Image (spheres, rainbow, N blue to C red):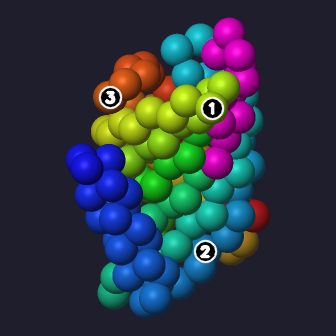
Amino acid sequence: MKNKVTLLIALCTLCAAGSFAEPKGWGIGLGTFDGDFGGQVRKSFAFGDENQFAVDLQAGLYNQWKWTGRFDADFHFIFMPKETFSLYPLVGADFALQDGRHRWGANLGGGALIDLNADTSLFFELKYVGGDWNGFAFTGGIFF
């Protein structure tokens, strides 16, 4: 029951954010989760008077003894959103699949954005995933 409530809350949040948010762009990145390497794709949505809030949806594939799919939805509050360099704390939910087993977790961390031009930016993120598969994740990549 607890997992169903968590999933319902996450889906409602994503649907609500997507209805009034401005799609920002797609991103790709490479990262590590507790020393296991992988890659991810992400889609970002920004909202607020100065686009200071963002929701990032992420899907990644990591090799943790076996291949693991990770799906994240993170909320960001972006400090100095109009500047070339900006920082953000993040909080979110994590869902992982491995060999037909699934696990839920919560994300807590932060990141940085470096704008290269109007449509392209670099991102770096460090977060702790707490839950059934605890661990630290570091990801770096590019939005386009």
Left or right, 37 with reference to 81: right
Left or right of 39 in this view: 52: left
First reached walking from the N terminus: tag 2 or tag 3: 2
Residue at image mark 2:
24
Instruction: State the residue at coordinates (64%, 16%).
Output: 64
Instruction: From the image, tell me which residue sits under label 3.
Output: 130
Q: Which-is-in-front pick, marks 2 and 3?
A: 3
Q: Amino acid at mark 3?
A: Gly
Q: Quadrant of residue 140?
A: top right
Residue 38 to residue 92: above or below: above
Mark 1 and mark 3: Cα distance apart in space: 20 Å
Secondary structure that dominates the magenta span: strand
- Residue 27 located within the stretch drawn in magenta: no
Circle 1: residue type: Gly
The residue lying toward the viewer, choosing from 51 and 58, is 58
Please, what is the three-letter code of the amino acid marked with disc 2?
A: Lys
Range drawn in magenta: 59-69
